[in-house]
């Protein structure tokens, strides 16, 4: 894989030893919430929610002009009291619809519990990549998962679009290195 491809979001499996440790997390189309709940006590810690500027690659993916505001929600997903996933959701400001209100009211509840409970949601293709300090979400993920003391050089992430009617949200999930050890 070339350096350029390592920095791009990939829709196909990446052939590397590091990827294989996370492949089951990166390729699983089922509910991440349900998978974490099966591992132990599950909780959601809300970190940030409101209007913000999406990352450049999110804006391009969602068709938002770079620099425009969108609805952004960031949470840490905890398993047995430890933050193991940083989740970052972007919803374009327009068109408005039911998804806008639902996201605004989630608080410390899981988005996965909402999208996998309503057949009206459609999930797009999964994309994955390794994030490093150059990616805008890397440091937020390090902080959310409390990895600052022994921060890894890269983190694995996946993202997919969830559509509901005319609205769609891009959900990026960044995984703690501890998940790849299991």
Image: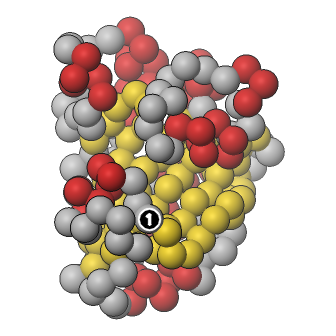
From the viewer's side, name the closer residue of 99 and 115. 99
Residue 41 % position (x, y): 75, 49
From the viewer's side, name the closer residue of 87 and 137. 137
Q: For the C terminus, which image quadrant?
A: top right
**Going 25% across and 33% down the picture, which residue do you hit?**
8
Drawn side of residue 98 relative to residue 3, left or right: right
Q: Residues within 10 Å of mark 1 (few under 14, many from 20)?
A: some
Q: Name the secondary structure under disc 1.
A: loop
**Going 38% across and 41% down the picture, which residue do you hit?**
158
Residue 140 to residue 13: above or below: below
Drawn side of residue 101 relative to residue 162, left or right: right
Q: For the N terminus, which image quadrant?
A: top left
Hey, which quadrant is residue 13 in on the image?
Answer: top left
Q: How many marks?
A: 1
Drawn side of residue 94 relative to residue 35, left or right: left
> According to the image, label 1 marks what residue?
53
Residue 170 % position (x, y): 35, 60
**Going 47% across and 44% down the picture, which residue do you hit?**
136
Residue 75 % position (x, y): 62, 58
Drawn side of residue 29 relative to residue 142, left or right: left
**Going 53% across and 37% down the picture, which residue do you hit?**
138
Residue positioned most to the top: 17
């Amino acid at each position: 894989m070339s350096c350029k491809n390592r920095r791009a979001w990939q829709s196909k499996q990446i052939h590397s030893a590091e990827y294989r440790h996370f492949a089951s997390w990166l390729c699983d189309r089922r509910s991440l919430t349900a998978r974490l709940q099966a591992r132990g006590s599950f909780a959601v810690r809300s970190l940030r929610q409101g209007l913000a500027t999406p990352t450049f690659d999110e804006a391009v993916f969602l068709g938002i002009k770079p620099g425009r505001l969108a609805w952004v929600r960031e949470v840490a997903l905890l398993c047995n009291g430890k933050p193991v996933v940083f989740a970052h959701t972007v919803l374009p400001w327009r068109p408005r619809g039911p998804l806008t209100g639902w996201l605004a009211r989630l608080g410390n509840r899981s988005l996965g519990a909402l999208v996998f409970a309503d057949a009206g949601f459609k999930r797009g293709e999964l994309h994955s990549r390794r994030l490093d300090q150059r990616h805008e979400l890397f440091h937020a993920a390090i902080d959310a998962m409390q990895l600052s003391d022994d921060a890894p050089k890269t983190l694995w992430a996946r993202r997919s679009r969830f559509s509901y009617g005319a609205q769609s949200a891009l959900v990026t999930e960044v995984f703690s290195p501890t998940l790849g050890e299991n």
